[in-house]
Amino acid sequence: MVEMEKNANKKSKRALLLLNVIFLAIGACGGPMVMRLYFLHGGSRLWLESWLETGGWPVTFIPLLVAYLRRRRKEGSPAKLYFMGGPVFVAATVIGLLTGLDDYIYSYGVDRLPVSTVSLVLASHLAFTALFAFILVKQRFTAYSINAVFLLIVGAGVLALHTSGDRPEGESSKEYFLGFFMTLAAAILYGFVLPLVELTYKKAKQAITFTLVLEIQLVMCFFATLFCTIGMLINKDFKFVLDWDMLLSSSSL
């Protein structure tokens, strides 16, 4: 019986891992293309695009609810509703605000660069992740990580030097380089955020379960979305959306 439960847990973990990989692949591949299409077809609301990057955070409630119902079935009424402690919540809040800032910087870069260039420049976040992981969580460098860091930095440098072939039509060199460096800044900040999450896990002083990870992601995405919502309010993006809806309604009549 115990062996069967262990096998079931292994299958469940593998299924969850596979599901997360699929979602990550869809988001990482499809997200930049959808964002670029928005800007190519006349979109100009950077805060709106930033908001959409984490705006789906309520979906996280679904697996959290399923996990809670399973605990409730096994443990009864004493089952915990959540596992996150106060210090972890504060850390997730700070990381979420940094993520919101990173979303905006990233959107700025996508507005001015082709998807291919954005993807390659943003890939340099692996180098910065390795560097910050070494500083924050004492993650050691290996020959493979050093080689990857070197190649990514060289690749980003080559892109910066050969900009005439992939520059969008009508865009000045100043705008292109600004988009390039904003994307690079997004990669640096993202490379800082990932080890910061790992540091949070390390300092949590509690068991890191799948449920706790989901709770941290929920808080991070909520505050990232809140950060972008404030930006939208300041930039009056909601007024733009309402005016656009009214225009569409009147044209349909």
Image (cartoon, helix red, strand yellow):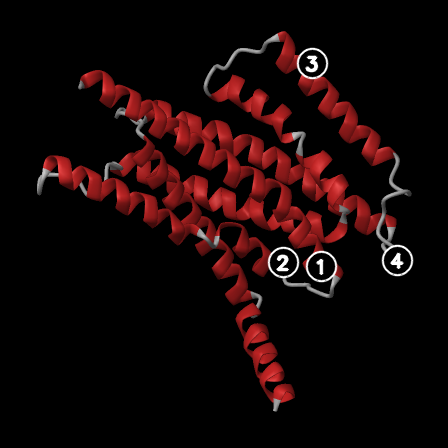
Task: Assign the N terminus to one quadrant of the image.
Answer: top left
Point 70% across, 47% down: residue: 109
In three-dimensional space, the C-alpha distance between marks 4 and 3, rounded to whole angstroms, equals 37 Å
Left or right, residue 53 beside residue 251: left
Q: Earlier in the sequence, mark 1 or mark 2?
A: 1
With respect to residue 2, does 41 lie above or below? below
With respect to residue 132, does 67 lie above or below? below
Q: Are the two marked residues, 4 and 2, in contact with CB atoms closer than 8 angstroms?
A: no
- Which of discs 1 and 2 lies nearer the camera? The answer is 1
Badge 3, how many Cα within 10 Å: few under 14, some, many 20+?
few
In three-dimensional space, the C-alpha distance between marks 1 and 3, rounded to whole angstroms, equals 35 Å
Please name the amino acid that badge 3 sits on.
Answer: Asn
Left or right, residue 1 beside residue 210: left
Secondary structure at numbered mark 3:
helix
Secondary structure at numbered mark 4:
loop
Q: Is any part of residue 106 visible from this angle? A: no
In three-dimensional space, the C-alpha distance between marks 1 and 2, rounded to whole angstroms, equals 9 Å
- Which of discs 3 and 2 lies nearer the camera? The answer is 3
Point 40% across, 31% down: residue: 15
Quarter of the image where one finds residue 13: top left
Q: Which residue is mark 1?
A: 39
Q: Which residue is mark 4?
A: 170
Q: Earlier in the sequence, mark 1 or mark 3?
A: 1
Q: Are the two marked residues, 3 and 2, in contact with CB atoms closer than 8 angstroms?
A: no
Please name the amino acid that badge 2 sits on.
Answer: Leu
In three-dimensional space, the C-alpha distance between marks 1 and 4, rounded to whole angstroms, equals 14 Å
Q: Which residue is mark 2?
A: 46
Badge 4, how many Cα within 10 Å: few under 14, some, many 20+?
few
Q: Which residue is mark 3?
A: 147
Q: Is any part of residue 135 visible from this angle? A: yes
